[in-house]
Image: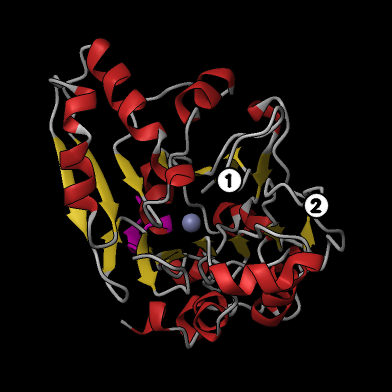
Amino acid sequence: MDLDLVFLGTAGSMPSAQRNPAALLVRRGGDRLLFDCGEGTQRQLLRSTVGLVELQQIFITHFHADHVLGLPGMFKTFALRGRELPLEVYGPRGLVDLLASLKRVVGRLSYEVRVNEVEPGDVLERDGYRLATFAVAHAVSSLGWALIEATRAGRFDVERADALGVPNGPERGALQRGEAVTLSDGRSVAPDDVLGPSRPGRKIVMTGDTAPSEQIVEAAWGGDVLVTEATFSEEERERARETRHQTAAQAAELAFGALQRGGVTYGSPITSSGSVMASIASCACSTDDSGTDTVTESSSPSAISASMPAERRISWISSASATSPATAT
Ligand SMILES: [Zn+2]
């Protein structure tokens, strides 16, 4: 199952000529999950290879302008296109008020917007994964989000299936789904006969704005990717502390602390103007891949997908063994 991240916006506080405010699209199989929707997000999608698809779920970390100003414009565009599909929006307490106040801006919509307020510790179950929320340390009502996959079936051993005489057809699909099959000669083949050891799921953790915190380390513990924001450079550490943000160095420390053996990079030039997001990716621990990925927003969102195919997943991580509050619920 493909799982990747498209960084649509990596600027903090305000856009720059090269960067959009926060927005991150997570693509898993056919699911398209948008996390935060800073100003200009719909245009970033239009410019990307993804396109402005009929998103069905949007997840908000908090209500500062650089994380939500893209919502009304996107809502309106969907309506102008005659959308009928309902849209689910999830966010921390206050989301109902926020969207109610946007009604005057948005006007009448051709579809239903379903508003879901969630608390730290809530978990949304999905097919093959769950979305767990955790507390972050920002100045307003805020949430972090963790996408945690279920344990996945082992790899299908084609040679073994051939040797056992399993025909190319629905029998192989059944075995892959964990069902035993009976062949035409009466022999029975069990899933364990053709599947390798089960594989742990992957885990992506997104914090939005935050000061460094132990809770984030716990939530991201054992994760494959941590996306966290740095708003200030190291010289402005005191200002970061006062405003409950973090510096780029603190964001990197956070990722090192949480991801342990993960190869970590953050790929944003640091400026004191506030346009910084440390996109910290750890995809580098499998035996056949010792490099690191640098994930940055470019002028072309189509070029910023940080692909994380299954074979690059970190073998020592098990989301089931993580001790974070996000996975304990
Ligand atoms: Zn903020």
- The residue pinned by badge 1 equals 5
- Residue 93, given in percent of the width and then of the height, sits at 23, 62
On the picture, is 22 further left or further right than 110? right
- Apparent side of residue 4 relative to residue 152 in the rendered image (left or right): right
| Residue 124 image offset from top left, x and y in percent | 27, 63
Quadrant of residue 75 in the image?
top left
| Residue 111 in view (yes/no) | yes
Give the quadrant of the C terminus: bottom left
Measure the C-alpha gap from mark 2 to mark 1.
22 Å
Q: Is residue 235 left or right of residue 61?
A: right
Q: Position of residue 127 (x, y in %)?
A: 31, 55
Q: 210 above or below 73?
A: below
Please tell me how many numbered marks the rendered image carries: 2
Residue 317 is covered by the magenta coloring? no
Q: Which residues are magenta?
A: 176-184
Q: Is residue 236 left or right of residue 57?
A: right
Judging depth in this view, the residue of 176 and 319 nearest the camera is: 319
> Above or below — where is 195 with respect to 303?
below
Residue occupying the point 43% across, 39% down = 37
**Could you say whether the residue bearing mark 1 is in a helix, strand or loop?**
strand
Residue that appears at 34% across and 64% down: 180
